[in-house]
Amino acid sequence: MEIARFSIVNLLLVISFLSIGGCNLVFKVQHKFNGRQRSLSAFTAHDMHRRGRFLSAIDLELGGNGHPSESGLYFAKIGLGTPAKDYYVQVDTGSDLLWVNCAGCTNCPRKSDLGIELTLYNPSSSSTSNLVTCDQDFCTSSHDGPNPDCTPDLNCEYTVSYGDGSSTTGHFVEDRVVLDQVTGNFRTASTNGSIVFGCGAQQSGQLGATSAAVDGILGFGQSNSSMISQLASLGKVRRIFAHCLDNIKGGGIFAIGEVVQPKVHTTPLVQQQAHYNVAMKAIEVGGDMLNLPTDVFDTDLSRGTIIDSGTTLAYLPDEIYEPLIAKIFARQTGLKLYSVEKQFTCFQYNGNIDDGFPDVTFHFEGSLSLRVRPREYLFDIDSDNWCVGWQNSGAQSRDGKGMILLGDLVLQNRLVLYDLENQTIGWTEYNCSSSIKVMDEKSGGIYTVGPHDLSSASSLRTGRTSVVLFILMLTMLHSFTN
């Protein structure tokens, strides 16, 4: 599907970690719109343009909150360069490339409304930085062959274009990345390694805006160019990761490696797809199966179901959205519905939401189900005023009108496991303010990884009486072209 498209030149990331025996690593992560008042259109805009061996588990320290009227994306803090400087990068399972804004870039944001300090990466300020040229192996391997215009001193460049018209252009550099290594239960130590990443030279569209600016993007897609795939190809980590987004206390857990507790039921990933596509079989509302067209769950390029933590809401094609909404409100015929910003269905209700509205359950191949409670798909914007988190994908994007996209709205308060080695994905309802256990492959030890919140969302929340809704715009569904 081409809701948003990447045009990548010389995309392949080459990652070679310094020899670190048997370690687990930690990234610090926070929600992008952590505790901030936003408009619904800002959420929709976000969702549109997103679009020795050590075999370790990596713990990304999460922050923020998944409530639609308070938060948006999650981002991590990583160190780059020597001496290392901190950079805040959006964590995105819908893309692969790691890039940060660089010194001298055009239209790169210099400040952010997210309450973070932005830093431009400057290769000349790092003693371990090296330019990557077009004649290097990773650069030629990202094409069908060598670049005929390549000369030994020509930089390896990239261009990324998004469906909303935003784009980023730059070249690749190799430098040191600083990460947190898990050394025991709730214990970490700093470690570092050498990676090749994008040095952003020019941004356009929303990527240059200050309202939701971060330093760059860290992709967790499943292609060979993603960081996790590159690390795995070098024998550094398993191609397995998991996240648990805490929408109650804020923050949560993000770990790379084998999760041994809790146990998670899985469903197969659809093969030959660029994203985390799964096969949905049915939708149940309040105990009744929706009567839907037989082809609505097809898994071809124009249809299918994508799991994407980089998306805030959940998007359904018209054939599903209309009967779903009708069924949800079937028991509440007296409600007066109104529209916010011409795209959100809202209403006033002073009763218990979970008692007044039905659960929605998605059924997948392999007998895996995902139950979404009313308090998860409805969100309050003011005293007794609620809005529906389900969105009509056909109304948001012509290209993606047949797609089902499940974002943080339905993923929060669950441990979601992505097993790329076995090509499965799964989840279980979980208390994301508790802890999980991961395996250290070298020692065989089991370590406890706890939740994190870089800057507590609860302390940053503002009164909801003044919250202006903000959510949508179909996101970061990335298809790659050379």
Image (cartoon, grey):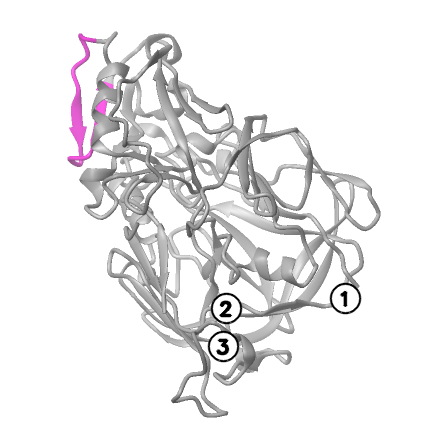
Label 1 residue SS: loop
Residue 364 is covered by the magenta coloring: no
Number of on-image labels: 3
Disc 1 designates what residue? 19
Q: Is residue 305 above or below residue 421?
A: above
Q: Earlier in the sequence, mark 3 or mark 2?
A: 2
**Lateral position of residue 18 relative to residue 251, left or right:** right
Disc 3 designates what residue? 139
The answer to whether residue 245 is visible is no
For badge 3, the amino acid type reads: Cys
Q: Position of residue 416 (x, y in %)?
A: 54, 35
Q: CA distance from mark 2 to mark 1?
A: 22 Å
Query: Dot 2, how many residues are within 10 Å of its Cα: few (below 14), some (14-19), or many (20+)?
Result: many
Query: Dot 3, how many residues are within 10 Å of its Cα: few (below 14), some (14-19), or many (20+)?
Result: many
Q: Mark 3–mark 2 contact, CB under 8 Å? A: yes
For badge 1, the amino acid type reads: Ser
Report the span colored magenta.
333-347
Residue 453: mark: none
Disc 2 designates what residue? 12
For badge 2, the amino acid type reads: Leu
